[in-house]
Image (cartoon, grey):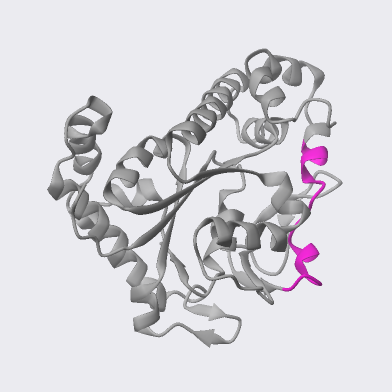
Amino acid sequence: MAIETKNKKVIVVYGMARGGTNILWNILSSHPDVCGTNLETGELLTRRRHGIRGRILHTYYSHSIVRGAPLFEPTAKKVDDIFYRNKLETLEHEFDKYKSENEVYSPEEVTKSALCIKSVNREHELNPLFEEIYDDCRFIGLIRDGYAICESWTRRGSDVKKIAKLYRKFGEQLSQDQESFKKHRIVKFEDILSDPFKIASELYSFAGLDPVDLPAIRLKSKSVMTSDGQHNPAFGQRNKKYWFTPETIDKIIKPGIAKVQTSLLSAETKASFEEEAMPILKRFGYVGEK
């Protein structure tokens, strides 16, 4: 679509809820030339304050490339405007206004920065919309150990069969996206946990950002599973963001978390999950790693 957009470079991070997208999103937003939105894609495109709740998605599915018709131009401009205005709010955020540990963005830097948005679950269905709107759009799809996903969701009351179907559908979509999008990369969450600074450098290169060796990465402290099965903030206060160096990153990144979560699954739950999810577990190398 030949329209003039306010956002010039857009990076789309997407994955399943409880799949590690928050860490990936914050790693990308730690680059000094990148600003993220304060809300996820679905929240932004259906917020009542914009007076368009549901209309953007309805218009998209009615007129977009999904149905083989040209994209409704006002829809594209509205989407870009919503993202752009939310990006400009970066300077109002307690943590995200810092482009490095002790340096605040200038208004001009935020304006020129690449936009990084995050989509979870079915929000990936909007990816074709983003690719058509933006000439420079990079997609990073995140896959995580299915057993860890299963434990996280069932602990919160979800049905194991439903989780397995969602996991399989998402894994299949990732593979399709890898073939169909011009600029797309699949990342395993476990690789991020193993060496977040290495992955950060690789993803900055993939996103076409200026190469930079960050002295620290800004991450949000969220509750994680400990070795004894407890669920506590990984570091500091929950939902606050802190900067971590290669020497301190282990205070918040726990590479062995998948094994802990898998150990908490009963044999029956694992078997039920595997009935549907096994093709994806095999495709991404999660079978035989336990």
Q: Please give the name of the residue rendered at 43% of the width and 42% of the height, measured from the top-left corner.
A: 182
Q: Position of residue 245 (x, y in %)?
A: 74, 73
Q: Position of residue 125 (x, y in %)?
A: 38, 34
Q: Quadrant of residue 114?
A: bottom left
The tally of labels here is 0
| Of residues 264 and 18, the one drawn nearer to the viewer in this rendering | 18
Q: Is residue 283 left or right of residue 70?
A: right
Q: Is residue 175 left or right of residue 69?
A: right
Q: Is residue 169 magenta?
A: no
Q: Please give the name of the residue rendered at 49% of the width and 61% of the height, measured from the top-left corner.
A: 208
| Of residues 16 and 160, the one drawn nearer to the viewer in this rendering | 16
Residue 226 sits above or below residue 89 on the image:
above
Q: Position of residue 226 (x, y in %)?
A: 81, 50
Q: Position of residue 66 (x, y in %)?
A: 27, 29
Q: Is residue 246 magenta?
A: yes
Q: Identify the magenta region.
A: 245-261
- Residue most extreme to the top: 275
Q: Is residue 179 left or right of residue 228?
A: left
Q: Please give the name of the residue rendered at 32% of the width and 53% of the height, measured from the top-left corner.
A: 135
Residue 207 sits above or below residue 183 on the image:
below
Residue 262 sits above or below residue 199 on the image:
above
